[in-house]
Image (cartoon, rainbow, N blue to C red):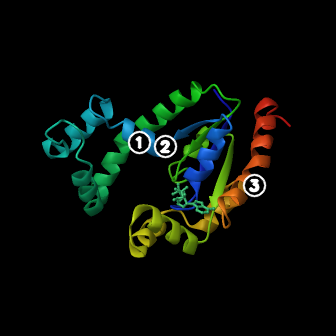
């Protein structure tokens, strides 16, 4: 198993930008959002379980998951959300563990917007929070996704509060300047992670 850094942050905080930088340094990055989509693809056991739990309407004509229909359904029913998460969370976790075990770089990164919320931090040796003010989060995410500030604010409200993430994380990088500024803060952390991965007891 690789030595793993869990990288998290709210929407628009700069997780993807930070992950891309680590990847450019040769570090394997596993993205929990990507894994979450992979485990419900056609042919995956989790999709069969979802089909069984909810019925035919969750599948499109081509047999793929009808994400929009399912999203609307669980939005209205907390019970349905629980059912869905009982199926997907273990599948996501299993797949993350498998992908981490295959990582070949000196250490690996697990990037997840819900690292603490879904206890995925248990799969990591250290956690890094990419932090930004709510104002910046809204500005960046709305520019990126073309969503309005209200929609972004709703997503922020559903995520763990910033202060709580700051409390939980081992390392914090405040991403409030240019991208170069972000990279300058990541470089010494990368050096430290290389050392820690080699000598976990130091
Ligand atoms: P997350 O993955 O946390 O949702 P992203 O890394 O996608 O956030 O960043 C959100 C948007 O803001 C992206 O378009 C990204 O390129 C941009 N961005 C991130 N950090 C900075 C920064 N320091 N300066 C300028 N733009 C940034």
- Distance from Cα at disc 2 to Cα at disc 1: 6 Å
How packed is label 3: few (under 14 Cα within 10 Å), some, or many (20 or more)? some
Q: Residue sitting at 31 percent across and 59 percent down?
A: 78
Residue 36: which disc? Answer: 1
Residue 32: which disc? Answer: 2
Q: Do the residues bearing badges 2 and 1 touch, measured as CB atoms within 8 Å?
A: yes
- Between 56 and 182, the one lying in front of the other is 182
| Residue that badge 3 annotates | 185
Q: Residue sitting at 70 percent across and 53 percent down?
A: 183
Quadrant holding the C terminus: top right
Q: Secondary structure at mark 3?
A: helix
Can residue 170 be seen at all in this image of the molecule? no
Q: Secondary structure at mark 1?
A: helix
Left or right placement of residue 108 versus residue 59 in this view: right
Q: Residue sitting at 67 percent across and 63 percent down?
A: 178
Where is residue 41 shown, x and y percent of the image? Answer: 31, 35
Where is residue 156 shown, x and y percent of the image? Answer: 48, 67
On screen, residue 102 above or below 76: above
How packed is label 2: few (under 14 Cα within 10 Å), some, or many (20 or more)? many
Quadrant holding the N terminus: top right
On screen, residue 168 above or below 156: above
């Amino acid at each position: 198993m690789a030595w793993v850094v869990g990288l998290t942050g709210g929407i628009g905080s700069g997780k993807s930008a930070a992950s891309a930088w680590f990847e450019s340094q040769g570090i394997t990055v596993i993205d929990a959002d990507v894994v979450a989509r992979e485990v419900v693809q056609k042919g995956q056991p989790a999709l069969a379980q979802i089909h069984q739990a909810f019925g035919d309407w969750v599948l499109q004509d081509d047999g793929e998951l009808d994400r929009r229909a399912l999203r609307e359904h669980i939005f209205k029913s907390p019970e349905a959300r629980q059912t869905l998460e009982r199926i997907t969370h273990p599948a996501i976790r299993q797949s993350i563990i498998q992908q981490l075990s295959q990582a070949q770089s000196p250490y690996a990164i697990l990037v997840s917007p819900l690292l603490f919320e879904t206890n995925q931090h248990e799969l990591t040796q250290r956690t890094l929070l990419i932090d930004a003010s709510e104002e910046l989060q809204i500005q960046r995410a709305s520019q990126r996704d073309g969503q309005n500030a209200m929609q972004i604010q709703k997503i922020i409200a559903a995520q763990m509060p910033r202060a709580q993430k700051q409390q939980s994380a081992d390392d914090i990088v405040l991403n409030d300047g240019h991208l170069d500024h972000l990279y300058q803060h990541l470089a010494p952390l990368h050096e430290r992670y290389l050392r820690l991965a080699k000598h976990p007891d130091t």
